[in-house]
Image (cartoon, rainbow, N blue to C red):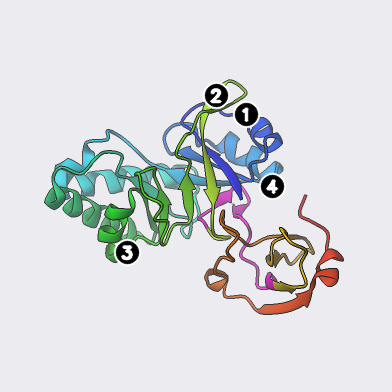
Amino acid sequence: MKAFDTDGALDLVAAKDAGACAVGLYLGGNLTNAALKQAAALDMGVWSFWEDLPTNPNGGAAQGVTDAWRAVALADAVAQPLEAPIYMPNDQAVTNWVATLDYFRAVANGIKGVGRVPGFYGQAAVWKEVQPYGYAYFCKAPDGTTDTSGANIVQGVSPSSAIGGVPVDVDEILTADFGGWNANGLWPAREVGMVYVEVTGAPKGEPTAWFVTADGYRFPAINAAGVPTSAAAFAIKRVTVPWDALLAVPARP
């Protein structure tokens, strides 16, 4: 699924017209109540970043405690659902691994300590080190590798697009549950009735895995390489149907 992220004043209508189903916005910046309401009206998802200085991870555990509380306070201020992750960044080359790992351990503990979910934005090599601290979501930054193991979102290597004059990173959402939400709550809604559908007899080039929502719409459940994503995060049932049967279900608007 196509998405954008930016710290600018993005026009969500223009973003949706450009093919995005979701946007990454910044707590304390462009992630406002007005933006969340507009996203809900457009049936778009939002995921939340928090960032201060790129060098913050060099500050170790003490800085991590401070940053976790700052991020949590901003998430509370916009009524971010507890289940939706706050993506915390490593936006620099690591020069001090001890301080960096201490920082992300403290951040994770601070966010989890108030019942929220920590997410990580950064390089694959750092993700592998910090994931055991309880980071449940991963937005992969360009790092010169093709390793997307565990990633929910992959940021484009050449983010050179502009939407309505606002520079954006072009992202690919790899999993149905990527931590999305809006003013209506989690997005897509984690409904008991949502079904993961594997399709037989699909024409060449068509996805072979789909989600069908409780309100009767379908959308692909594949990543950028055409590989089906995991449905486990939704704890939903899995069925197999022929291609013709899937076509009887309308595509999500």
Q: Nearer the viewer, residue 23 or 167?
A: 167
Q: Find numbered disc 4 in the image and state the secondary structure of the residue it sits on.
A: loop
State if disc 1 and disc 4 touch (CB < 8 Å): no
Query: Would you identify the image quadrant in which residue 161 lies?
Result: top right
Whole-angstrom CA distance, mark 2 to mark 1, is 8 Å
Which labelled disc corresponds to residue 11?
A: 1
The spot of residue 211 in percent (x, y) is: 68, 65
At x 17%, y 54%, the residue is 102
Q: Nearer the viewer, residue 128 or 189?
A: 128
Q: Find numbered disc 3 in the image and state the secondary structure of the residue it sits on.
A: loop
| Disc 4 target residue | 43
Q: Find numbered disc 2 in the image and state the secondary structure of the residue it sits on.
A: strand
Mark 2 / mark 1, whichever is N-terminal? 1
| Disc 2 target residue | 166
Whole-angstrom CA distance, mark 2 to mark 4, is 21 Å
Labels 2, 4: front one: 2
Side of 107 relative to 34 (left or right): left
Mark 4 / mark 1, whichever is N-terminal? 1
At x 43%, y 46%, the residue is 75
Q: Amino acid at mark 1?
A: Asp
Total labels: the figure holds: 4
The spot of residue 144 in percent (x, y) is: 35, 44
Whole-angstrom CA distance, mark 4 to mark 1, is 14 Å
